[in-house]
Amino acid sequence: MSQYQTSSIVNASTLVKYATIVGRVVPASSEDYMKLTRLAWNFRRAVQVVARIIAKGVEANDVLKELRRMLNKAYADSAFNQAKAVVRACLATGGDPRKIEIGKLFIISEGESSRMGNRNIRFEDTNIVKVKYPYDGSWIQLKARFGEKYLSPLKELVELAKQKKVSYNAKIVFRSSRIYIHVSVPIHLYLKHFKKADARGELVAGFDLNSDRINLAIIDKYGRLADAKTVWFTEITSHGFPHNKAKTTRLRALAKLLKYCYAHGVGTVVFENLYEVKKRRFTKSRNTNRKISRFAKRELLDHAIVMSLKHGFKVLLTDPKGTTNSKEHDEAMRRYRLDRHTASAYLIALRGLNPS
């Protein structure tokens, strides 16, 4: 058991700063629509071009100077940061960042508390969004639509932003003839409105996140397996399956398992610390590699942490090393007659018993 006690453990609540709320936006006029489309097209192109330039090793200052000629400073900085993220993701999946192609139109603006929350994409109210048009300094007017449950936290966010007390990142995405807005709400504000009562159970749950399933193992305070579950969604890894539909399916599966944990005496949940994984491991199977490359594990982990905090769990992250292909892993499979993914979930749960 000493190996599990000394494994690197991180309290996930210290890592998550924001939670994302998604709504729809509609331009107030045809002119606003044309302006928004032009801005999104230029922003996407800027990110794509800069990603290729970064991949060639060009100095950051030179790249930023060029970007700021195309966009205003805040848009340029956001595009630069997005391009760096695209390059990192491309390298992690074994791709060539010099050949990056970006499909959907989008705009990103990072938060600034001194600029009423955001310099370029700004909420006037829960149903009105203004987008800075950098080419003539005007504002594009958008009508915003959010689910009713999100209106209270959004209203508070808007009020605090106008007082220059908080900032929020915002992203506008064109998808399937509709336009969506993703708003990053400070996590403390999000949990204020959505958190359930603290989960006070003594059991510990370990999760193994995979492209076609999520495996759960629940243990007691002595490290004995108390329960195990697997939710499969093999259809979403098939060729041509819509990415957004796959994401929704995984999140529903995760929500189902977290709800189960909450109702069955779990107080702590543990996930692998995928933020520390520098590069994905590929196999000799082209089909398996395709599944791996399409699976945004870190994105799912972001959602997993926020969803777990909403349920009031203590959320821990553990070093993935040793949770597969180890003597302890093989022993867990034999002892409890587990498949290899559930055995990994069991070892992940053990790490949460005595975090160092």
Image: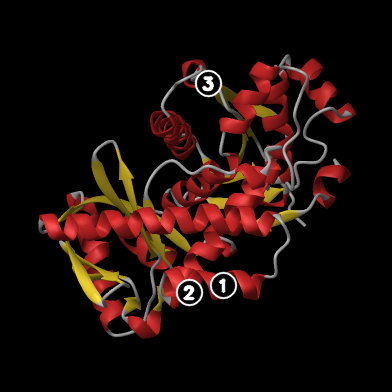
Label disc, if present, on residue 116 of the rendered structure: none
Report the front residue among 89 and 258.
89
The amino acid pointed to by label 1 is Leu
Left or right: residue 114 versus residue 27 is right
The amino acid pointed to by label 3 is Thr
Mark 2 element type: helix
Look at 73% across and 21% down and name the residue there: 340
Label disc, if present, on residue 237 of the rendered structure: 3
Q: Report if the CB atoms under discs 1 and 3 are less than 8 Å apart.
A: no
Residue under pointer 1 = 64
Instruction: Give the class, few, some or many, for how many residues have Cα within 10 Å of label 1's Cα (few <14, many ≥20).
Output: some
- 14 lies above or below 325: below
Alpha carbon of mark 2 to alpha carbon of mark 3: how far?
40 Å
The amino acid pointed to by label 2 is Arg
Label disc, if present, on residue 68 of the rendered structure: 2
Look at 35% across and 76% down and name the residue there: 119
Mark 1 element type: helix
Q: Is residue 198 visible?
A: no
